Image (tube, rainbow, N blue to C red):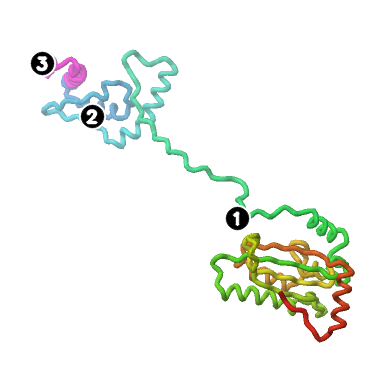
């Protein structure tokens, strides 16, 4: 058998000579030692040992009559980390001999980073709250200073107060829905009352925008509500000026919750009538008790 491998080595290439001579020596030694087979232990040791040489990856030419066990893919995969660790240790200690290279390890693909996840509070939808004007801040400061009981009392700052409300409706609102919003607003003249049954609204009127000046800014419906005192106005308005339910009108609060889905814009303007104008209005009402004021 040794002669056969020598002849094959003479006819073969230099690249295939080394593994065949090694196999021939091993087989000759096995026959000289009394016929004890050493192929299986050699193959098992080769499968358990880490692959640290380039010759381990060279293709093996099958030889008639000789079977060479091949390690299973699972065994190769299991020994890869050990081979990598052994190669790294040998490289650190300087024990790697010349001509021996560690097996190449395929780089594990790095997943692409996902989209950034926002942190912190989520943004609030809808338009931002308008900045409070000087008069609005003064009214809220007054409520905090004197207390809500006095701020919403019927005799707080007596005198006529006009409360003007302009509405801009949702473009998809139906005629029936718009009519219901107007009807419920006008009903506040009767249902807005204090705990003792006293009526809060002195008068209320409404109308559809009909100006041709082109400065209506899209507002479609207007309401004019009259109160006999600022205290009545404060009790009717409620939130956001008055936040305690004990001191604001529950009927008006219920209307605001109903109408909110149909309204995309509201403008509110309040003003107090001069004292002499209020006196003249009361005198005219006494002189003509049977007449009612026209709505316009």
**Mark in the foreground, 2 or 1:** 1
Q: Tell me the quarter of the image containing the N terminus.
A: top left
Instruction: Report x, y in % for residue 90.
Output: 40, 19
N-term-proximal mark, 1 vs 3: 3
- Can residue 33 be seen? no
Residue assigned mark 2: 40
Q: Residue at x 39, y 35 (%)?
A: 109
Residue assigned mark 1: 125
Q: Tell me the quarter of the image containing the C terminus.
A: bottom right
Does residue 256 appear to the left or right of 7 in the view shown?
right
Find residue 229 and report its image quarter.
bottom right
Question: Residue reaching furthest front?
Answer: 212
The residues bearing labels 1 and 3 have C-alpha atoms spaced at a distance of 85 Å
Instruction: Report x, y in % for residue 91.
Output: 41, 18
166, 197: nearer the viewer? 166
Q: Which residues are magenta?
A: 1-29
């Amino acid at each position: 058998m040794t002669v056969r491998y020598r002849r094959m080595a003479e006819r073969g290439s230099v690249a295939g000579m080394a593994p065949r001579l090694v196999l021939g020596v091993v087989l000759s030694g096995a026959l000289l030692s009394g016929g004890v087979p050493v192929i299986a232990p050699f193959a098992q040791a080769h499968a358990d040992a880490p692959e640290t040489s380039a010759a381990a990856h060279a293709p093996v030419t099958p030889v008639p009559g000789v079977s060479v066990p091949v390690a299973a893919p699972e065994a190769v995969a299991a020994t890869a980390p050990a081979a990598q660790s052994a190669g790294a240790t040998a490289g650190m200690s300087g024990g790697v001999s010349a001509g021996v290279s560690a097996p190449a390890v395929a780089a594990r693909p790095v997943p692409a980073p996902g989209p950034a996840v926002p942190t912190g509070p989520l943004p609030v939808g809808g338009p931002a709250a308008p900045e409070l004007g000087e008069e609005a801040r003064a009214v809220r400061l007054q409520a905090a200073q004197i207390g809500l009981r006095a701020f919403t009392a019927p005799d707080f700052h007596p005198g006529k107060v006009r409360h003007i409300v302009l509405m801009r409706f949702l473009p998809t609102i139906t005629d029936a829905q718009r009519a219901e919003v107007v009807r419920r607003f006008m009903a506040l003249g009767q249902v807005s009352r204090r705990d003792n049954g006293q009526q809060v609204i002195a008068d209320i009127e409404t109308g559809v925008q009909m100006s041709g000046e082109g400065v209506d800014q899209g507002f479609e419906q207007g309401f004019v509500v009259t109160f006999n005192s600022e205290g009545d106005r404060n009790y009717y308005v409620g939130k956001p000026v008055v936040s305690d339910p004990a001191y604001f009108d529950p009927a008006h609060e219920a209307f605001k919750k109903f109408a909110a889905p149909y309204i995309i814009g509201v403008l509110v303007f309040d003003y107090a009538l001069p004292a002499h104008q209020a006196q003249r209005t009361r005198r005219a009402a006494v002189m003509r008790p049977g007449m009612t004021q026209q709505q316009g």
